[in-house]
Amino acid sequence: MRARLTSPLATVRNIGVLAHVDAGKTTVTERMLYLAGATHKRGEVHDGTTVTDFDQQERERGITIFAAAVSCDWDGHRVNVIDTPGHVDFSDEVERSLRVLDGAIAVFDGVAGVEPQSESVWRRADRHGVPRIAFVNKLDRAGADLDAAVESIRRRLHPAPLVVQLPIGREDGFTGVVDLVGMRALVWDGDVCQAGPVPDDLLAQARQRRRRLEEAVAELHAGALEEFCSEPSLSEATLTAALRDLTRTGDGVVVLCGSAYRNRGVEPLLDAVVRYLPSPLDVPAVRGQDGEVRPADPAAPLAALAFKVTATATGRLTYVRIYSGTLRKGDTVLDAGTGRTERAGRILRVQADRHSEAEQAVAGDIVALVGPKAARAGTTLCAPQAPLLLEPPGATEPVVSVAVEVRRSIDGDRLAAALARLAEEDPSLAVRSDAETGQTVLSGMGELHLEVAVEKLRRDHRLEVNVGRPQVAYRETVVRGVSGLLYRHVKQDGGAGQFAHVVIDVEPLEEGGFAFASTVTGGRVPREYVRAVEAGCRDALAAGPLGGHPVTGVRVTLTDGATHTKDSSDLAFRTAGRLALREALRSCELRLLEPVVEVTVTVPDDMAGGVLGDLTARRGRISGSRARAGAVVVTAVVPLAEVFGYATRLRSRTQGRGTFTTRPASYAPAR
């Protein structure tokens, strides 16, 4: 235990900043860097002077597009921060970042509370088991209400919010907070934070809220409950330790508040990061896909996960989180997925787009490597003598596509190389060639995602391209199946022939996806050929009979078959499986599915009627409407194809006063 406490890893925090677009993530990150002394000037999103939003497109659009890693020192701790995008089109960038984080700050708008993308990233963090603290931002805005924001967190995200601060003043009069753990007031005068006693007019309310916090903690923490029952109140040390334990187990979420833009509440937020969020020693040891565990120990064999790849003017950078071991400049590492070796020529400490060289990196570090040529996001890099394969981050299927072509035919090869580079940097982009039209098709997560990718082609690769109208990614699904479809694949063209005889049943699969089973008995189809039939069926799902779209929601059962002593092979049964399912799908009743999104529109209350009518005309289904500070927030489920161009339409209908956000919902029958 003593060695654990004295380990340098105990003073490391690897955290991310998560939120809905415009909740203030980047401003929170900039203020953390400024107050910790990592920067000497406060970066502003509206001025395009932020450290983390360094890309030209980010500064022009005023949003975070690419996850950026930065570091600062606070209270003797090294805090590595990844500022993640908030726009739904870049949610895969958040997914890859969450995969390598030990903790996170979830930022919420003090007026809006939990917004759609806030909920989406929260659920992603739940899946990865990432402990979080919450920061309710923008309390200086008109209509900001900490209690309402906390209630939306409780209602929509279902954690146990543990509010540890009380605002001093409201809206324009917000000047500081009461720290309920230490029972002291923190008031800001410009950039200076002054600590003092709780104001007399807030003392009774602060005591009441402190007692409420103690009761909530005692309900969840056995150690705190024991003291709660035997003492008049919980001590600061007991309350702090209990909040730390509840945060790291996920049983509670510490809630702080402030206004990052006005530089109020950020110092206590940094204190909370150090105090409550885990170090690399406090999270479970990384586990390989074979079950092998590697501890967070610099002396253990190397295990690292690449989560981001970028191309810069100085070369290709591979961002990695080192889970165990030590990586030194010039070391040879193994790509556990491909079996190839790579060389870590240089190790860089990253501060967004600025880098400094390091001789080595140890367990718990997040660094960039120069040298690996074939590593991709999700690649495991490990010691050659101790292979270990880590689970890669999940990837979402693209839902929107555009055709891309060069204006000059001589640029065709350059376009192919540039698109390959984009797909390498961003795995949520997909590039394919349309077999019917011969066009190059670029697919992504939304209109903005594709706009950013095309702009990179124009700016970074200096290509003049034409882009087609966005098209959504349709799917086909089985509504009514067929039974006992027999298919015989026999081919004889001299020499060894091909023979495969299969009988399959096809039925709908309610939960979507693809399921395969075999009920063949008596060895009529050997096990290796059953696997070949399944592979062939998967091949057939790439293009359905309705319109050549991928097929989902289908279960295939192999019920019978026959083999030939000489002519049967894996290839023959794979071909039979593919052709049998194609024939079966032509006999099934199929339905076309289209992607739908949840749209949240905020408009002045006197304009809500026109917006509701417009959403209905776009085949939208209204799912909710609520009033909020002179505005109406409308939630609807709308086909993705109908959302194209909606921003312009909404601006014209609301004289520029309406805003909307989207998040993927599901696939639904096309109407």
Image (spheres, rainbow, N blue to C red):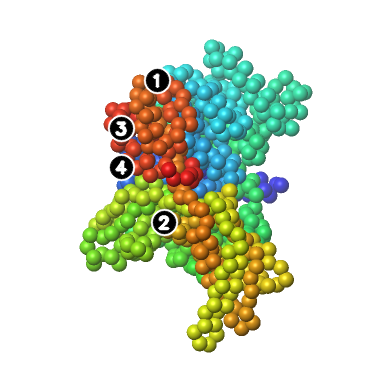
- Gap between marks 4 and 2, in whole Å? 39 Å
Q: Quadrant of residue 182?
A: top right
From the viewer's perspective, is the residue at label 4 or at label 3 nearer?
Answer: 3
Marks 4 and 3 in Cβ contact (< 8 Å): no
Res. 60 in view: yes
**Which residue has dot 3 on it?**
651
Which amino acid is tagged 4?
Glu
Residue drawn at x 51%, y 64% as measured from the top left:
583
Q: In the rendered image, which residue does mark 2 sit on?
A: 547
Q: How far apart are marks 1 and 3 (CA)?
A: 18 Å
The image position of residue 321, as x and y in percent, is 53, 54
Quarter of the view holding residue 362: bottom right
Confirm or deny contact between disc 3 and disc 2 (CB under 8 A): no
Task: Tell me the distance, in whole angstroms, between the alpha carbons under discs 4 and 3.
Answer: 19 Å
Looking at the image, is 589 positioned above or below residue 114? below
Tell me how far mark 4 sits from mark 1, CA to CA: 30 Å
Please tell me which residue is depicted at 63% across the width and 68% down the height of the picture.
530
User: What amino acid is found at the position of numbered circle 3 in the picture?
Assistant: Arg
Q: Do the residues labelled 4 and 1 touch (CB within 8 Å)?
A: no
